[in-house]
Image (cartoon, grey):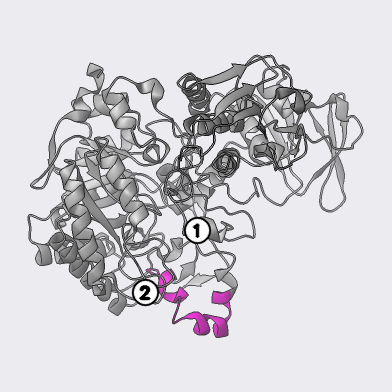
């Protein structure tokens, strides 16, 4: 191991519990040991247990599973009323402890206004009759109960009810009872969720959300009373020596309702600012908390707590390091943390632990590989949120995430096996076949790897001189360093298996390949919209590949993800981008996480990037474009260049048949998740 990482592998203590190293696997939605989406009541989640045991066997120091609701979302049963759950937990803890890892269970008071109400549930709640009808199964008013009546984060046309004092006291009691059951099951500690990310306890703490006039609102002490009473109740039930961590946001980065403060923006903090946080951290420590598991943000500034690739690496470190000066308990920092930076900060006493979440989904062995000086073998997390947490929303829409995704969070776009071990797994081929894979993009490379691991004889054909396909262009922007690392990872992985790679080889007739099975992974081609002057435009892929230089003023036609990322990159280069989009919002495609899309929307607004919504392209001229808005009014936008980001269409080399399989964009235009998971779906059956 490189000496610069040594500080990561020193022991430390949370209360009286010693942790073998400074790497903390942070909680993620969908990884609760008590089940994430159980329609018939919580059940011990064996898939999550398998996930954690594999990471524990790969040198993680402390594991904190995803939130365990104190009260079931469905049917309303309290977690402490399910003794069988804790019997199974005790058996699991024995297995965890054999690895040398420690585990804290994260318990949540709830989400309040941040409950991700969906397009399916929203209408049921808004109607008094249907709300009453579904209440025995799903009490939406309870789930949405907030410190004060206010609009829901995901559904501003729905008002959240004010939580009663009786409900508050019931939750405090449930924390104490559930924590005691966790302790008796051998759990090393609990984490209280959360004065963090704008969840319920945080809503009570933040004056912007809390307008109460009783003892749980108004003054500083009253607003933090709920969180303080929770830890005091746990300590009374479990003893002072039982560690209690707190998930904590140093600053809210809140500009207003559904508006965050992007990095570098000079805006008034409407939530917890640093001055209040200095006081709050000390107050919460004195109340009894033994650790702060910290980052920044609320659901209104979700990109701080769930940083996409647009956010700087180690984006929360400076704020978290500052707050450590005001407490004596350990402080963990999360948020795109890099091991070398974290190790240096730990060695200098700025933080005590490195919080990592989604990298554990992409590669369960990343700590082991770091210890063995195999950093190039680590499959990088690219911060896409496509498999793990793709809660999505746009103007006029609640959370549009597919129900199947809601039921199966914490999967990984890049690692098809994560939380899907019963669906995606490597099984030796019953009959070894000669398989040709046509197309060396991500889909083709993933297919080749799965097939080779199963024992098939694989030849990969790529018509260009480089592997990566359209993802080479997608990885080109300056902020896509992890995407570029992913391409390099694939190229390296291919060398580990007996896969014949033929570059600069265009396949025109698949019959000539002499293969038993053929995988077509030839991707897609850009759409060409029928408007005058279209030939004057630059295709997005050509711009990203550096085939065209652009001037200072650039108009991008298409405000989907690619168009917005191009505009963001142009802004970073010091240019003046303008976005023209036919829809009523940017990035309206379902399945793209709100943390990612809200950053782009907030960034463009904060930095005055011109965005024309509900506007269509009429003509491209030599000096700009003519567009037409929703009222039929035409106007001109001056531009040195016009970039076309108007989508793609599938371009399969051949038709699907019994022995010809089409995957990825060649089958249906999608993203990395669709192409990688489909590669497994197809290649497991060959």
Asked if the stretch drawn in magenta spans residue 136, the answer is yes
Residue 90, percent across and down?
A: 18, 59
Crowdedness of circle 2 by 10 Å Cα count: few (<14), some, many (20+)? some
Write down the residue under mark 1. Answer: 406
Left or right: 619, with 60 as reference point? right
Residue under the point 24% across and 35% down: 59
Q: Is residue 278 visible?
A: no
Q: CA distance from mark 1 to mark 2?
A: 26 Å
Count the marks: how many?
2
Left or right: where 271 falls relative to 267: left
User: What residue occupies the far right of the structure in this picture?
Assistant: 532
At which x and y percent is residue 468? 60, 24
Q: Tell me the chief SS of the magenta region.
A: helix
The quadrant the C terminus occupies is top right
Q: 265 or 242, which is in the foreground?
A: 242
First in sequence: mark 1 vs mark 2 = 2
Helix or strand or loop: what does disc 2 sit on?
Answer: loop
Decide: marks 1, 2 in contact (CB < 8 A)? no
Magenta residues, start to end: 124-147
Name the residue rendered at 57%, 46% in the picture. 592
Tell me the residue at 14%/53% (across/down). 243
């Amino acid at each position: 191991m490189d000496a610069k990482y040594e500080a990561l592998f020193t022991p430390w203590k949370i209360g009286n519990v010693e942790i073998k190293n400074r790497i903390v696997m942070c909680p993620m939605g969908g990884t609760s040991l008590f089940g994430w989406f159980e329609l018939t009541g919580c059940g011990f989640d064996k898939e999550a247990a398998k996930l954690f045991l594999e990471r524990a066997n790969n040198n993680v120091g402390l594991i904190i599973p995803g939130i365990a609701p104190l009260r079931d979302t469905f049917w309303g049963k309290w977690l402490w009323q399910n003794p069988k759950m804790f019997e199974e937990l005790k058996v699991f803890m024995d297995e965890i402890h054999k690895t040398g890892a420690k585990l804290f269970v994260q318990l949540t008071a709830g989400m309040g206004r941040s409950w991700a109400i969906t397009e399916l549930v929203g209408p049921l709640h808004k109607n008094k009759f249907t709300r009453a009808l579904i209440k025995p199964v799903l009490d939406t008013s309870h789930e949405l109960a907030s410190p004060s009546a206010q609009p829901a984060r995901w559904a501003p046309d729905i008002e959240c009810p004010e939580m009663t004092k009786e409900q508050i006291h019931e939750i405090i009691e449930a924390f104490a009872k559930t924590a005691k059951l966790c302790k008796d099951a051998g759990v090393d500690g609990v984490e209280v969720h959360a004065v963090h990310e704008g969840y319920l306890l945080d809503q009570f703490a933040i004056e912007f959300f809390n307008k109460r006039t009783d003892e749980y609102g108004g003054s500083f002490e009253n607003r933090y009373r709920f969180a303080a009473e929770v830890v005091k109740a746990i300590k009374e039930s479990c003893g002072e020596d039982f560690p209690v961590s707190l998930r904590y946001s140093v600053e809210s980065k809140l500009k207003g309702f559904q508006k965050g403060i992007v990095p570098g923006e000079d805006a008034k903090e409407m939530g917890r600012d640093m001055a209040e946080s200095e006081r709050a951290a000390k107050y919460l420590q004195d109340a009894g908390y033994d650790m702060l598991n910290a980052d920044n943000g609320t659901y209104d500034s979700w990109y701080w707590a769930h940083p996409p690739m647009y956010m700087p690496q180690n984006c929360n470190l400076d704020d978290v390091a500052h707050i450590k000066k005001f407490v004596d308990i350990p402080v963990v920092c999360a948020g795109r943390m890099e091991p070398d930076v974290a190790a240096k900060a730990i060695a200098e006493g700025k933080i005590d632990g490195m919080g990592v979440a989604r990298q554990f989904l992409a590669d369960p062995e990343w700590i082991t590989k770091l210890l063995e000086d195999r950093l190039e073998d680590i499959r990088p997390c690219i911060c896409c949120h496509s498999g793990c947490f793709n809660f999505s929303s746009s103007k006029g829409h609640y959370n549009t995430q597919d129900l199947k995704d809601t039921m199966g969070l914490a999967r990984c776009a890049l690692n098809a096996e994560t939380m899907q071990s019963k669906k995606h797994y490597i099984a030796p081929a019953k009959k070894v076949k000669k398989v040709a894979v046509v197309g060396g993009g991500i889909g083709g490379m993933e297919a080749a790897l799965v097939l080779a691991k199963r024992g098939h004889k694989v030849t990969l054909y790529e018509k260009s001189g480089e592997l990566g396909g359209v993802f080479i262009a997608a990885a080109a922007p300056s902020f896509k360093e992890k995407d570029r690392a992913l391409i390099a990872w694939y190229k390296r992985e291919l060398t580990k298996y007996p896969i014949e790679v033929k570059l600069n080889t265009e396949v025109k007739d698949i019959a000539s390949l002499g293969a038993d099975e053929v995988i077509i992974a030839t991707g897609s081609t850009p759409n060409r919209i029928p408007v005058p002057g279209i030939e004057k435009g630059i295709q997005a892929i050509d711009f990203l590949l550096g085939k065209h230089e652009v001037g200072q003023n650039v108009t991008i036609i298409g405000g989907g993800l690619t168009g917005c990322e191009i505009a963001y990159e142009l802004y970073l280069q010091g240019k003046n981008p303008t976005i023209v989009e036919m829809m009523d919002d940017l990035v309206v495609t379902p399945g793209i996480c709100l943390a990612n899309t809200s950053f782009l929307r907030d960034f463009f607004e904060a930095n005055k990037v011109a965005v024309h919504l509900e506007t269509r392209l009429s003509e491209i001229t030599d000096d700009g474009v003519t567009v037409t808005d929703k009222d039929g009014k035409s106007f001109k936008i001056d531009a040195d260049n016009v970039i076309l980001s108007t989508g793609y269409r599938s371009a399969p080399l051949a038709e699907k048949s019994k022995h010809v399989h089409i995957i990825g964009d060649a089958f249906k235009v999608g993203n990395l998740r669709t192409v990688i998971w489909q590669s497994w779906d197809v290649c497991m059956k060959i």
